[in-house]
Each structure stands twice: as structure tokens, then as C-alpha cells.
Image: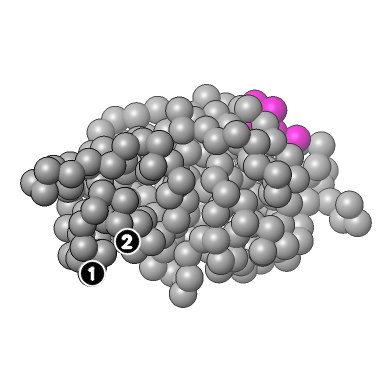
């Protein structure tokens, strides 16, 4: 390492809040009228991808016309929002790590492929976390391309006024880790959610809880 890291950027779903099962539930709720259902084993490979990519693949997997992707994406939001607003806790270790980073005056941000309304429902309403807890939040509408492209993380670094190579990013999926590495950041995979994946080879570090976050990598 040629320079200390100066900021931490978090993914949201599966990193801060165990919300990925809600997205899965909402997908099957929308599929129900067609008599179709996607199983978790098939859906898991789509974690961390954009909604259009997710729905196109879901429809192909369950045997529906992929040309209906836009229609399903358009109807998905309302179903999902109601589920995301349910009260839920932050994943263990999140609150303590955020408090420690703030005490150290380390800038923190969120870079999520979720849309703004979903972020507000998950963090603000469901988890009761004020959005201004973070120095910056980047959601899907703010960039041209979602993960695995680097856009979300590069935008977060820009808003923090920290060079990407001085940022640590915390992710839980392959598209997320790919996005982090494409942005030139240090990538940590955390495996603390109910949807945790096996260790991802491309990650610079793999931890089982944010309680294991390597604070020694940060500038003092």
C-alpha cells in the first residue's frame, strides 16, 4: 500500500441491512399471477445486478417472455416498497463500525444499485437510519451504468472528494466486488447476511462480520 485509505464506502443490501430476501419475495409476489416462481438457488446468481438484468433473467428462467421485462420492472417498485418499509435491524456490527468511523472522522458513503425510493424505504423507514448519517449516498438514478460497472463507486468518491484509490469499499456480491475493483478501490467482501456468498476470489479481503473490519488500513 503506497498511501493510507481515507474513506469507506458501503453497499447497502446485504452489507448494511439484510434486505436481499425482500427483493426475492417481491419478485415471486409479482410472478404469482402467472403461476410461476423462481427458486432461491436460481435467483441467488442475480444478486447485485440491475433490475432490468435481474428481471430479464428471471423471466427467461421461469419460462416467460423476456420482452415483458420493462413491464415487470415498472410494476416491481410498488410491490417492493411496501415490503422494504417493514421494520428491520442493521446487520450486526454496522452501527458500531459507523460510530467508530465517525469518531475517527473518516468520511463514509453508500453506493447502491437500488433506486432512491428503495434506499429511503430500507434505511430511513425500515432501519430508522437518517440518510444524513452518511457523507454521501449514491443510488441508481445518479449514474449511467449500474454494477458491475464502476460508476456508482466513482460517483461516491467524487462526492466525498477522495481519490478512488484511497477508498475502501464493502460489498457482498460478485457484481459489487467487480464494480469496486473497476473503480480502483480496496475491496472487502463481508459475509454477514442471510444471503452471504462463498468467498469471492477478486476481493482483497473477506470478513464474516463488520466487527472484523480492518481499521488499521485507515489513515490516523
Establish if 61 lies above or below 66.
Answer: above
Give the Cα distance between marks 2 and 1.
8 Å
Q: Nearer the viewer, residue 14 or 202?
A: 202
Rendered residue at 81%/47% (across/down): 219
Q: x, y percentage for residue 173? A: 54, 45
Question: Residue at 26% of width from left, 49% of height from top?
Answer: 62
The image position of residue 58, as x and y in percent, is 31, 52
State whether residue 30 appears in this view: yes
Q: Are marks 2 and 1 in contact (CB under 8 Å)?
A: no
Q: Is residue 212 magenta?
A: yes
Badge 1, how many Cα within 10 Å: few under 14, some, many 20+? few
Q: Residue at x 18, y 52 (%)?
A: 78
- Label 2 crowd bin: few (<14), some (14–19), many (20+), radius 10 Å: many
Verify whether residue 122 appears in magenta. Answer: no
* Residue 209 sits in quarter: top right
Q: What stretch of residues is rendered in magenta?
A: 210-214
Residue 92 at what x, y percent from top left? 52, 25
**Residue at mark 2:** 56
Residue 156 lies left or right of residue 42; in this view the side is right
| Residue 67: mark in rendering | 1
Q: Secondary structure at mark 2?
A: helix
State the residue lying farthest toward the right: 2
Amino acid at each position: 500500500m503506497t498511501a493510507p485509505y481515507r474513506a469507506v464506502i458501503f453497499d447497502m443490501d446485504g452489507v448494511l441491512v439484510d434486505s436481499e430476501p425482500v427483493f426475492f419475495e417481491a419478485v415471486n409476489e409479482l410472478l404469482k399471477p402467472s403461476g410461476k416462481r423462481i427458486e432461491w438457488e436460481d435467483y441467488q446468481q442475480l444478486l447485485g445486478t440491475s433490475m432490468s438484468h435481474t428481471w430479464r433473467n428471471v423471466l427467461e428462467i421461469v419460462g416467460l417472455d423476456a420482452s415483458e421485462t420493462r413491464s415487470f420492472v415498472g410494476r416491481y417498485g410498488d410491490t417492493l416498497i411496501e415490503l422494504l418499509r417493514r421494520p428491520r435491524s442493521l446487520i450486526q456490527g454496522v452501527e458500531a463500525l459507523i460510530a467508530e468511523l465517525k469518531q475517527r472522522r473518516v468520511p463514509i458513503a453508500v453506493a447502491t444499485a437500488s433506486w432512491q425510493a428503495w434506499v429511503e424505504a430500507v434505511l430511513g423507514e425500515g432501519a430508522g437510519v437518517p440518510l444524513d448519517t452518511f457523507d454521501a449516498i449514491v443510488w441508481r438514478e445518479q449514474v449511467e451504468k449500474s454494477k458491475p460497472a464502476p460508476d456508482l463507486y466513482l460517483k461516491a468518491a467524487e462526492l466525498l472528494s477522495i481519490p478512488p484509490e484511497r477508498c475502501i469499499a464493502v460489498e457482498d456480491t460478485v457484481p459489487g466486488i467487480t464494480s469496486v475493483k473497476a473503480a480502483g478501490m480496496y475491496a472487502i467482501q463481508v459475509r454477514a447476511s442471510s444471503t452471504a456468498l462463498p468467498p469471492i476470489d477478486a476481493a482483497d479481503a473477506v470478513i464474516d462480520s463488520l466487527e472484523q473490519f480492518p481499521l488499521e488500513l485507515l489513515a490516523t
